Amino acid sequence: MKKILLGFALTISCLSFGQKIKVKKDIAFVEGKEFVKITEDPISRHSYNVTSLSGTDLFYLKYNTYKDPKEVDYKYNRDGSVGYFEVMSADFNTAYFETHLTGCLMGCNITENFIKIIYGGKVVKEDGTLDINKLEVLSKKIGFEYTQKREEMGSASNGSTVIMQDTKPRNGFNISIGR
């Protein structure tokens, strides 16, 4: 009985405190209220323009990938690709932070994680403008995790792959025909 009550209380708390985010017809809704407009960039694949509801440019979500040998999964991710968004200013001069994509199989938008971040950080004001001070704080909190990982991978291997072959002599003999 205690387990059932605990499970019920946990479910209720998750449902009441979790932010409900939906993206319908390029408009992001948070808890049923219109928040920002997100449109896919027609030139760059999987990149997005984020504007206020009044049409003011706020952010540009630039989609990037890199290959990480630690992320190789022979069933789902054979080449070890890691995708993320670089959150940039609308004029492309400043990169604020990097964030992972929302991962799901069906029924969600890959930008939902970004929407949760800027909504939770209160970066966009009620009038649709940016709060630069809160954006700077958020940028320092989140940082550039994927850039750091790429740099660590680059410094560890210096861009070269070393293949070592075991050349112990074998017992017996080998016959090679045609060589």
Image (cartoon, helix red, strand yellow):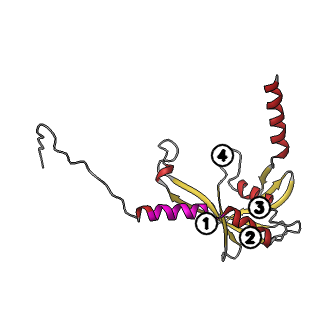
* Residue picked out by circle 2: 136
Q: Residue 58: where, in percent of width, then height?
A: 76, 70
Earlier in the chain: of badge 2 and badge 4, it is 4
Residue range (magenta): 143-155
Earlier in the chain: of badge 1 and badge 2, it is 1
Q: Quadrant of the N terminus?
A: top right
* Element class at badge 1: loop
- Measuring 60% from the left and 61% from the top, which residue is drawn there? 145
* Residue picked out by circle 4: 104
Contact, mark 4 vs mark 3 (Cβ under 8 Å): no
* Residue 118 marker: 3
- Measuring 69% from the left and 76% from the top, which residue is drawn there? 91
Earlier in the chain: of badge 4 and badge 3, it is 4
Is the magenta region chiefly helix, strand or loop? Answer: helix
> What amino acid type is highlighted by mark number 2?
Glu
* Residue 44 marker: 1
Q: Residue 109: where, in percent of width, then height?
A: 70, 52
Earlier in the chain: of badge 4 and badge 1, it is 1
> What amino acid type is highlighted by mark number 3?
Ile
Asked if 155 appears above or below 80 in the picture, the reply is below
* Element class at badge 2: helix
**Eye-nearest disc, 2 or 4:** 2
Mark 4 → mark 1, Cα distance in angstroms:
22 Å
Quadrant of the rendered image containing residue 8: top right
**Eye-nearest disc, 1 or 2:** 2
Earlier in the chain: of badge 3 and badge 1, it is 1
Q: Residue 127: where, in percent of width, then height?
A: 88, 69
Contact, mark 2 vs mark 4 (Cβ under 8 Å): no
- Measuring 51% from the left and 65% from the top, which residue is drawn there? 151
